[in-house]
Image (cartoon, helix red, strand yellow):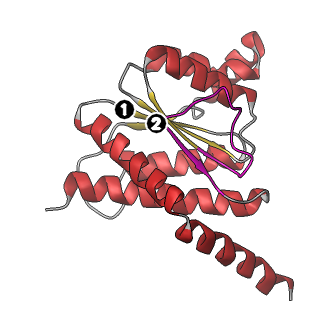
């Protein structure tokens, strides 16, 4: 049955992640960077395309709203949620510029940029990373096994060991939820 096969593939990928000490350390580093930034008054920005944009928005809201705890909201924003901005910049400068210009407008050194890209090749994501580096943001990238271009050097790279877009996105949500949960625990648990 195809349904069982799909569920099995998802479980197998998550088992691979669980058994990969490098990935476990990268997830740990990610939430630690975010906690440090948030405790010092900095912000967390998220970006992605398509399903990854939806996931970025979802994960951002876990911080700015709440996850498990009724607590102070955290300064977290998905960069694509202003459709007038997004369409104007895409029209005037090209879609490659939408996230880089948002980073230039909104961010400061010490902020965090979390990029979700199954391919790691999206031009608008790569330009956002370049802009973030220029300003002094810490950068966390979640990709598929192809990773990102070798000249791009994020602070943390979480490469999900798969080429299958839906399985990668499922893993990104799992990892994103873990990061959000750990941030909340670290900052608000008594």
Residue located beneath label 1 in the image: 43
Which residue sits at x=37%, y=20%?
109
Which residue reaches farthest right?
Answer: 1
Residue 148: quadrant of the picture: top right
Q: Which mark identifies residue 87?
A: none
Which residue sits at x=80%, y=82%?
5
Circle 1 packing at 10 Å, graded few (<14), some (14-19), many (20+), is many
Proximity of marks 1 and 2: CB atoms separated by less than 8 Å: yes
Q: Nearer the viewer, residue 70 or 33?
A: 33
Give whichever of discs 1 and 2 has the lower sequence position: 1
Q: Is residue 45 left or right of residue 48?
A: left
Nearer to us: label 1 or label 2: 1
Q: Is residue 42 above or below residue 30?
A: above
> Label 1 vs label 2: CA separation?
8 Å
Circle 2 packing at 10 Å, graded few (<14), some (14-19), many (20+), is many
Across and down, in percent, residue 189 comes to 19, 61
Which secondary structure class fits the magenta region best?
A: loop
Q: Nearer the viewer, residue 92 or 15?
A: 15
Which residue sits at x=59%, y=16%?
101
Q: Is residue 120 left or right of residue 37?
A: right
Q: Is residue 187 left or right of residue 137?
A: left
Residue range (magenta): 142-160
Q: Is residue 40 above or below residue 27?
A: above
- Which of the image's four quarters has the C terminus? bottom left
Residue located beneath label 2 in the image: 77
Q: Is residue 70 above or below residue 147?
A: below
């Amino acid at each position: 049955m195809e349904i069982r096969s799909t569920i099995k593939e998802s479980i197998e990928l998550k088992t691979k992640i669980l058994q990969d000490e490098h990935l476990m350390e990268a997830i740990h580093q990610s939430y630690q960077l975010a906690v440090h930034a948030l405790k010092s008054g900095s912000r967390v920005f998220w970006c992605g395309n398509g399903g990854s944009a939806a996931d970025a928005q979802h994960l951002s809201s876990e911080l700015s709203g709440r996850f498990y705890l009724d607590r102070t909201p955290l300064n977290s924003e998905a960069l694509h949620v202003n459709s007038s901005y997004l369409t104007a910049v895409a029209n005037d400068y090209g879609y490659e510029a939408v996230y880089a210009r948002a980073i230039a407008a909104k961010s400061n050194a010490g902020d965090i940029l979390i990029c979700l890209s199954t391919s790691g090749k999206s031009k608008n994501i790569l330009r956002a990373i370049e802009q973030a580096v220029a300003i002094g943001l810490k950068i966390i990238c979640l990709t598929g096994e192809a990773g990102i271009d070798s000249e791009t050097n994020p602070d943390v790279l979480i490469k999900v060991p798969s080429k299958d877009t839906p399985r990668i996105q499922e893993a990104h949500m799992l990892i994103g939820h873990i990061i959000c949960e750990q941030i909340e625990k670290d900052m608000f648990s008594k």
